[in-house]
Image (cartoon, grey):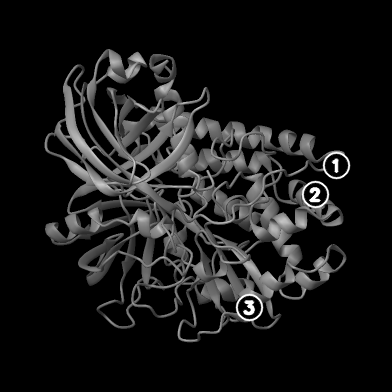
Amino acid sequence: MVRQHTTTLVRAGSTLSAMALALTLGASACGSDPAQPPSGTPDASSGGGPSGDGGGPNVPDPDPSDALFDPDHVIEVGITMAPEDWDTLRRQSRDVAELFGEGCMDGPRESPYGQFPASVTVDGTTLEMSAVRKKGFLGSASMSKPSLKVSFDKYVDGREHAGLEGLTLNNARQDPSLIKTCLAFKVFRDAGLPASRCNFAHVTVNGEDLGIYAHVEPVGKRLLARHFTDADGDLYEGQISDFRDGWTATYEKKTNEDDPDRSELDAVAAALLASDAELDAALGAVLDIEAFRRYWATEALIAAWDGYAANANNHLVYLDLASGKMSFLPWGPDVSFDPVDTLGPPGRPQSVSANGAIASRLYQTPELRAAYAEAMKDLLETAWKEDALLLEIERMEELLSPYVREDAEAVRVATDAIRGFVTGRRATITAEIAPTPPEWMFPAHATVCMTTLGTMTGTFSTTWGSLAQMDPFASGTGTLDVAIPADDPQSAEIVGAAAGQEGSEPGLDGRAQLSMVGSFPDGTVRALVFYVDAEVFNDGGEGPYDWQSAFGVAIDYTESEPVLTGIFAGGKIHFDKASREPGAPVTGSFEATVLGDAPF
């Protein structure tokens, strides 16, 4: 019985851990401070942009920042800082229990990232006394290649470089092609929607080559002035945020922070309570509803799984004071252009995502579902130009080729997959929406907050490469003690362990995987899967379950189909011995607080 379940441990572990990532990626992904430099003043750095990027009456043209967003230019960014500061910066991380434990939706998630002084050189110009900090939520978190926010004016008041107060550098950790972020922003702009400019940066820190980053324009007053009549309205960032009961408090105000008024959010939420007959008018009074339909359709068209419509994540909303209406802007679209939506609910249509409250309410109303389909058709006719997109992909690929020689094959494979997506997307979408758009049968999550189920502790002893045997008992052993619930502790009677290279989910590639399984006296069969960063997976290494050091899930194998029962928050994993040499011993211990009851 035990072996019957464990023969599929590794594959199912990978699949189920992807389900856990559904709540966190990218929440992905780019996260944190799109609108402001670290000093906390409203950003005025975003420039007028190149032709075709929209225009506003309050922004001069040309803009001094155009050169740093030249799509054909890879900017060179060299950062020099105290080695101990860099080590502290890259190890800073978010508390998973705080993000997803009880009360997680009481307000915006506070940033754990500190500022550090640095000398920053941009294309040969050095700006001493700049500031650097880490950025990102969970999916993009990395110790070896952290996303970075650079401020030129933190310590030198009012300083700019080429019209910018700083740089936003996203690490593309979830994107082996490196081009998805900039390509996604281009599609939003081609659709006539407000979106950041984006090009690439080659980044070094203290002489260490960190590779290619996406250099993203922050959403600030100049960008807003290009697209809205009034740039002085309220801007909010949404990370696991929505316009439904209990969710609006997580929106983080990015401009006018001293004004506590958030009534515009409540007005949108209230409009969603209108009857079907009155919904369009009620919502249209507080939301630019036609622009939203186009934004929503664009997210679905590029498979922006970790955005608003699909995951209530990675988006911005702005109140244009002139119209009195809210509008959506994209943010963190690096989980896009995937041929198969592996992280969405099984069987979901490709032509629509409707987990976000606005998208869900509109799509469940028949007349308004038809309006969405028309918006998608118009998008395909006016903005989705395959030949132009393929040329843009080729341009980006050639531009980056000198920087990715060591990873050229992985980049090529990932880029070819995007080409395939672009080539086949029109047929996929058209087949689904004609003659009528598909049903959306997936209810939105009531909450993302989890409860504490109990604890797990144990030890493991196995060898590297044993994961390929698909049977942990064949090459490993250990102990596994479970207190779920806390007043019902049990020790596994039989324990197996295996380790190796596994995991193809975005954000997990390249990590070591450790899998354990145990059979308990009450007849349950539990499995654990750990994904461990290279800096932790070594002799004497240890790290918390913060999604960058280690990521752990608990799985129930008692029935024929495995069920993901929890994720690991408090505690840590420790390795006495760990090496990627074939047959090398992998030994150590772990302790964990298990969070569960999440809407996986």
Q: How would you rate the neighbour count of disc 3 (Cα within 10 Å): few for under 14, some for 14-19, many for 20 or more? A: some
Is the residue 431 above or below the residue 380 in the image? above
Res 438 quadrant in image: top right
x then y, percent, for residue 574? 18, 39
Q: Is residue 597 left or right of residue 488?
A: right
Residue 436 is tagged as 1
Q: Are marks 2 and 1 in contact (CB under 8 Å)?
A: yes
Res 279 quadrant in image: bottom right
Is residue 73 in view?
no
Query: At label 1, which amino acid type do we have?
Result: Thr
At numbered mark 2, what does the secondary structure look like: helix, strand or loop? helix
At numbered mark 1, what does the secondary structure look like: helix, strand or loop? loop
Q: Nearer the viewer, residue 149 or 526?
A: 526
Question: Which residue: 23% across, 39% down?
Answer: 590
Q: What is the C-alpha distance between the residues marked 3 and 2? A: 27 Å
Is the residue 588 above or below the residue 450 in the image? above
Q: Are marks 1 and 3 in contact (CB under 8 Å)?
A: no
Question: Which residue: 31% across, 52% down?
Answer: 146
Residue position for label 2: 373
